[in-house]
């Protein structure tokens, strides 16, 4: 398994997660993946690395909007990767996703959030058999409120220790 990030994580210590992690979940010690690629100059190297499945969990920032477009979908054509985006819809150029589906550059796609959101009833994406859309529910959990309260408590302790708090919300 390979991962891509904008920022270099060259050591085991730099890959450790210094954030809230539920016991038994995540990768708090930074042991996975086996290979990290980083920086905008390595994005295409990562995408061309014979992926079978691409899971996109990116924040919706100016730098990330439209980061997957025609050029990146072309890189998938060797293995025809499947694209899953439980993150933000605007990171994928929707028109070029349609092109990739039509030209079989990708095996298929599953999106939890689209651009535009909500996807209009007459939108072209609805017609594809190799496309799945879920109703913006990837973050839902029976334990959501409990987890939010744990993160709040974690942040209060970190703030009292003058440490950075967990803040996963990035906006345009």
Image (cartoon, grey):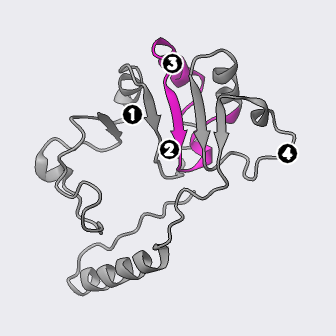
On screen, residue 32 above or below 131: below
Residue position for label 2: 63
On screen, residue 162 above or below 81: below
Mark with earlier residue (4, 1): 1
Q: Position of residue 143 (x, y in %)?
A: 45, 73
Residue 10: image quadrant is top left
Residue shown at 51% from the left, 18% from the top:
80
Q: Position of residue 18 (x, y in %)?
A: 23, 64
Q: CA distance from mark 4 to mark 1?
A: 35 Å
Q: CA distance from mark 3 to mark 1?
A: 22 Å
Residue shown at 43% from the left, 77% from the top:
148
Residue position for label 1: 40
Q: Give the secondary structure at mark 1.
A: helix
Q: Nearer the viewer, residue 37 or 110?
A: 110
**Classed neighbour count for the residue bearing mark 2: other residues with Cα under 10 Å, few (<14), some (14–19), many (≥20):** few
Mark with earlier residue (1, 2): 1
Q: Position of residue 63 (x, y in %)?
A: 50, 44
Q: Which residues are magenta?
A: 68-94
Q: Give the secondary structure at mark 4.
A: loop
Whether residue 101 appears in this view of the structure is yes
Mark with earlier residue (4, 3): 3
Q: Is residue 50 magenta?
A: no
Q: Give the secondary structure at mark 3.
A: loop
**Classed neighbour count for the residue bearing mark 4: other residues with Cα under 10 Å, few (<14), some (14–19), many (≥20):** few
Residue position for label 4: 121
Q: CA distance from mark 1 to mark 2?
A: 10 Å
Kindly check if marks 1 and 2 are in contact, taking CB atoms under 8 A apart as contact: yes
Q: CA distance from mark 4 to mark 3?
A: 27 Å
Q: Nearer the viewer, residue 11 or 129?
A: 129
Kindly check if marks 3 and 1 are in contact, taking CB atoms under 8 A apart as contact: no
Q: Is residue 89 magenta?
A: yes
């Amino acid at each position: 398994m390979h991962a891509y990030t904008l920022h270099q994580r060259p050591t085991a210590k730099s890959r450790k997660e210094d954030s809230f992690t539920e016991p038994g979940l995540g990768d708090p010690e930074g042991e996975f993946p086996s290979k990290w690629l980083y920086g905008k100059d390595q994005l295409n190297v990562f995408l061309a690395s014979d992926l079978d499945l691409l899971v996109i969990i990116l924040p919706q920032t100016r730098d990330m909007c439209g980061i997957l477009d025609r050029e990146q979908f072309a890189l998938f054509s060797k293995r025809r990767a499947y694209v899953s985006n439980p993150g933000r819809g605007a990171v994928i150029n929707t028109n070029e996703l349609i092109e990739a589906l039509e030209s079989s550059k990708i095996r298929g796609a599953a999106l939890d959030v689209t651009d535009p959101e909500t996807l209009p009833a007459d939108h072209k994406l609805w017609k594809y058999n190799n496309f799945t859309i879920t109703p913006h529910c990837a973050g839902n959990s029976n334990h959501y409120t409990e987890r939010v309260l744990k993160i709040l408590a974690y942040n209060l302790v970190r703030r009292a220790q003058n440490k950075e708090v967990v803040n996963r919300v990035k906006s345009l």
